[in-house]
Image (spheres, helix red, strand yellow):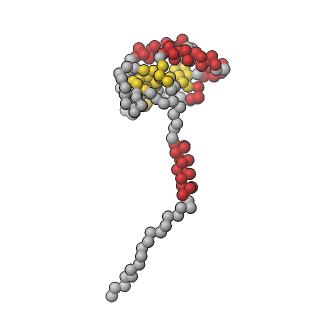
Amino acid sequence: MRLYRNRNHDIPALNTASLPDLIFSILFFFMLVVHMRKATVHVKYQVPTATELSRLYNKSSVQYIYIGRPVNRLGQVDGKETVVQLNDHLTSIPEIRNYLIRLSAALPPEQRRQLSVSIKADRHVDMGTIMDLKQALREANVLNVNFTAVMDRKGQTE
């Protein structure tokens, strides 16, 4: 009384006609989501936390300065001294001053007023280094200075 037949249960073939559409939509998704960096960071820094933050607008006229410990090609910390990076190069504070003076001289007056600096410093950087950098920025007449921080989730600063 066996009514079962031995049927061959094959898995249907994968329809490859829609594969290019799928690949294109995944590529488009990653193009929208991924943020491309303008500069390679050669400095290890841990961003401090804050409670009162504001968003930085008009990022085209912003020069980024990173302050922290140097990093080798593998991403490991390579020393204990503090180094300063402007855009994509490790520099010193007087060189930053000279660069910003040359940059502001090359800009039209409208963009010169919008020129700003965003400092991304490690939370353990000596305050003397920050003060020297701020003095160099004053000498270069770059008065719009922003410090990068992340929002403290507890509502308290460390």
Judge from the rendering whether residue 26 lies leftward or rightward of residue 4; answer left or right. right
Q: Residue furthest bottom?
A: 1
- Measuring from the top left, give residue 81's x and y in whole percent: 37, 19
Residue 16 higher or lower than 48, as above or below: below
- Measuring from the top left, give residue 84's x and y in whole percent: 45, 21
Q: Looking at the image, which residue is at 51% across and 38% down?
A: 35
Q: Residue furthest left?
A: 1
Residue 19 higher or lower than 13, as above or below: above
On the image, which quarter does residue 1 sit in?
bottom left
Q: Residue furthest front?
A: 73
Residue 105 higher or lower than 36, as above or below: above
Judge from the rendering whether residue 34 lies leftward or rightward of residue 155; answer left or right. right
Q: Looking at the image, which residue is at 54% across and 20% down?
A: 144
Judge from the rendering whether residue 107 lies leftward or rightward of residue 69; answer left or right. right
Q: How many marks?
A: 0
The quadrant in which the C terminus is found is top left
Q: Looking at the image, which residue is at 51% across and 16% down?
A: 95
Residue 58 higher or lower than 138, as above or below: below
- Measuring from the top left, give residue 15's x and y in whole percent: 52, 64
- Measuring from the top left, give residue 114's x and y in whole percent: 60, 22
Q: Is residue 157 visible?
A: no
In the image, 127 versus 10, the foreground residue is 10
Q: Is residue 140 visible?
A: yes
On the image, which quarter does residue 69 sit in?
top left
Q: Looking at the image, which residue is at 53% across and 53% down?
A: 23
In the image, 71 versus 1, the foreground residue is 71
